[in-house]
Image (cartoon, rainbow, N blue to C red):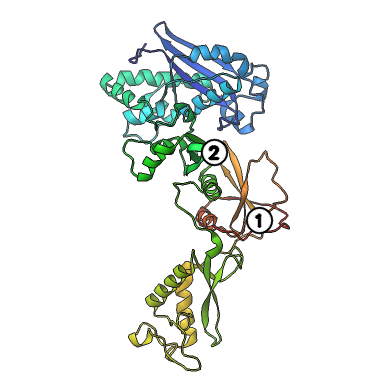
Amino acid sequence: MTNPLRQPLVFVDLETTGANASGDRITEIGIVEVSEQGVSEWSTLVNPQAPISPFIQRLTGISDEMVSSAPAFAEIAGALLERLRGRLFIAHNVRFDYGFLRSEFKRAGMDFRADVLCTVKLSRKLFPQHHKHNLDALVERHQLPVTSRHRALADAQAIHAFWCRIHEELPSETIQSALHELLKPLRLPPGLDVSTVEDLPEAHGVYLFYGEKDAPLYVGKSSNIRRSALAHFAADRKHHRDALIAEQIRRVEWIETAGDLGAQLTESRLIKTLKPAHNPHRKGGHELCSWKLEPAENGAMTVRLVYARELDFGIEPGLYGLFSSKKKAVDALREIAAAHRLCLIQLGLEHPPQGKRASCSAYPHQHCKGLCAGKEAPGQHDIRLMGALARMAVQPWPFPGTVGIRETANWGGMTEIHLIDRWGYLGTFRPEQEIPHVIDVRPGFELEIYKILTRYLKQARIDIIPVALDMSRPESRDSV
């Protein structure tokens, strides 16, 4: 028996109906117990009281029929709690197994807490030269005996075998140093109780910090909610903002998402609605403007400043640049004119005396090629103007109507459908939820959503679902 920590250990693995501890359920539990009395094993199937998806059945080999006569979690909760209590809880991706068990115990009216050790993080500490640290990689690298992958007891046995193997391969001082680092207690602000961060998941999503009287302090997104949220409280804080948050924080919430797109959309919506004190202020959309390319009276092309409060930027063609104010739009146009020697009069940046023909102020300094002085053909100026504006082109909504963007967690867990129309975010739904046929208020063009989606739509594999919605209700021109 190898136990340098000199405390009882439990090596735990679970099989579940999915990846979300708040909604999915446990189907099998496997435990290897290590104590002064020796090594013992225990496992059981669990009736999740919910159907197991075909994907999960293929992955684990556990079918609805196999669990139909198994005990529900509540029936074994008391005995299981006694097996786990007072022991170091060791698992591969420990937050997954620990989070599921805490959720199941909570449903059963019990509070379960334990010190935890993640063997993924332990492997990374001990073997930093390797890139892969999933259980399959550890089995292959350390030649661990495995009877059946993706069954709970077999995987718990593999985790225990890894524990034994590292004590054969490495000096005890090396292992103790890694364990000391990984088992350090959390450093939390004085106003934040450890119970409020106990269940933070290592998953995509959004975390929210609240202060006194539930005042919103900060909203952040991450591919690892737990890591990013706790980083705000690290000793080596990089931002003065984090010091202020640490003084004011009283509570943490989080929302898990299927992936990065859902996290970005949720973060944008929450910042817009909650207006947290320590997020950068996002100005309202009433001044959002763009340059629209159109013919002038002299036959050449010019630009006109238009506002999102007046036009639907989601479908309006010929828009260039998105600016939060008229001043920023004019400054950007002046920079383009200077860089490409465009005529300031033709662009509407200068106006000649009424009834007189005059060149613009840039022409005498050779910063204009002379359209205003009759030295350049209108067609040539048009070509140069359109070339200069091309990189700023606003992309019109590329679909005929509302679409859903399906996003699924990496290993086939949670799936979400994000409803979008004309660069406005309508909401996110799960496949088991009914998508509403009527949207009360369709949002106007949202700058932040436009930025998020134009980046996302450049990816190669995107699952787009046409959605028929009744948009007969009034629409909002508010933008972000």
Residue 114 lies in quadrant: top left
* Residue at x 44%, y 37% (from the top left corner): 249
Q: Earlier in the sequence, mark 1 or mark 2?
A: 2
Q: Is residue 344 above or below residue 72?
A: below
Q: In this picture, is 446 found above or below 340?
A: above
Name the quadrant of the N terminus: top left
Q: Residues within 10 Å of mark 2 (few under 14, many from 20)?
A: some
Secondary structure category for the residue under label 1: loop
Of 120 and 164, nearer the camera is 120
Packing grade of label 1 (10 A; few <14, some 14-19, many >=20) is many
Task: Out of 465 and 65, give the one closest to the viewer.
Answer: 465
Question: Residue 94: image x %, image y %?
Answer: 46, 26
> In the picture, residue 174 is in which quadrant?
top left
Instruction: Single out the residue that lies furthest toward the front.
Output: 213
Label drawn at residue 219: none
Tell which residue pokes out farthest to the bottom in this image.
356
Q: Which residue is mark 2?
A: 255
User: Looking at the picture, how far across and down is residue 355, in whole percent?
Assistant: 50, 94
Quarter of the figure with residue 229: top left
Whether residue 394 is visible: no
Q: Is residue 475 visible?
A: yes
Q: Is the C-beta separation of discs 1 and 2 under 8 Å?
A: no
Residue tagged by mark 1?
Answer: 442
Q: Secondary structure at mark 2?
A: strand
**Quarter that holds the C terminus:** bottom right
Residue at coordinates 38% horizontally, 45% vertically from top-left? Answer: 241
- Circle 1: residue type: Arg
